[in-house]
Amino acid sequence: MLVTSLAGCQTMSDVTGSLASKSETEPAGDSRRAVEVYGERYRANAKDPEAALAYGQALRANGQRAQATAVLEQATLANPGNKALLAAYGRSLVDNGNFQQAFDVLSKAHSPDNPDWRILSVQGTTLDQLGKHEEARRYYESALKIAPGEPSVLSNLGLSYMLSRDLPRAEEVLRQAYANPKADSRVRQNLGLVVGLQGRFAEAVDIVKADLPPEAAAANVAYLKEMLKGKDGPRGGRGQIPVAQLNRGD
């Protein structure tokens, strides 16, 4: 929900469309079971890249992010050059807020002659978190050349404009993402956030209420109103505008 995202400025949440694995979308009970199953396989042979990858993803899905990073770091050391492991390790570093290190690791997870749009998009989010918004947008644009109209990338691009306080442009891009049939609830929440930040609260409620109970949608918008009370729009230093649902690349 937006309130959850808004309450912690510059958090990053999962959006469909990047480096996805089944384990990350499983119910909590299944996630715990996956940790047990893949943990046994990993402990039987910690140098097996597939076992380490599955275990790391299961840990992430279960919220054990620091442990996932440790497992995936060791796996990349044991299997240098394994791009799937590098991608997963970079993704786990994003989870833990190590954005520069994540960017550097993800740069090794694909190559200029064979770029992966999902990784490009995640690299863009790391740059946005580092305040390098113009550079981040070049990564999103490169991703969109490979995957035109991909809503998860467009959502990230829109939030990048939001971070630099270009709300009309952010809304324009997020509406492109919103119009795509593949857009999920988090894309709609991002659009609702940007619309709400511009003071159009009733419209923001209409956008987000498709995914939330009426009380929750109203609470989200009430939070926005409180945040912007007495202001014409978002102002102040970096970090005062929250990132609702940046696509870290599942």
Image: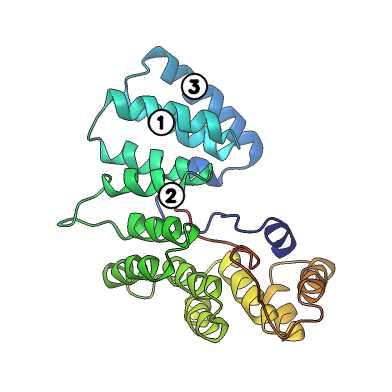
As helix, strand or loop, the secondary structure at mark 3 comes to helix
Residue highlighted by disc 1: 72
Q: Position of residue 144 (x, y in %)?
A: 33, 71
**Label 2 amino acid?**
Ala
As helix, strand or loop, the secondary structure at mark 1 comes to helix
Residue highlighted by disc 3: 39
What residue sits 70% from the left and 62% below the top?
6
Q: Nearer the viewer, residue 189 or 11?
A: 11
- Tell me the CA gap for discs 2 and 3: 19 Å
What residue sits 49% from the left and 21% below the top?
39
Answer left or right for 224 relative to 55: right
Dot 1: within a 10 Å radius of its alpha carbon, few (fewer than 14), some, or many (20 or more) residues? Answer: many
Q: Position of residue 186 (x, y in %)?
A: 59, 65
Answer left or right for 127 relative to 141: right
- Give the mark nearest the N terminus, 3 or 1: 3
Question: Quadrant of the rendered structure where residue 243 is?
Answer: bottom right
Vertical placement of 233 versus 188: above or below? below
Answer left or right for 84 relative to 112: right
- Give the mark nearest the N terminus, 1 or 2: 2
Q: Position of residue 187 (x, y in %)?
A: 56, 69
**Label 1 amino acid?**
Leu
- Tell me the CA gap for discs 3 and 1: 13 Å
As helix, strand or loop, the secondary structure at mark 2 comes to loop
- Can you name the residue that lies furthest to the left here? 113
**Label 3 amino acid?**
Gly
- Tell me the CA gap for discs 1 and 2: 16 Å
Residue highlighted by disc 2: 20
Vertical placement of 89 versus 238: above or below? above
Nearest to viewer (mark 3 / mark 1): 1
Q: Position of residue 232 (x, y in %)?
A: 72, 86
- Can you name the residue that lies furthest to the top here? 44
Nearest to viewer (mark 1 / mark 2): 1
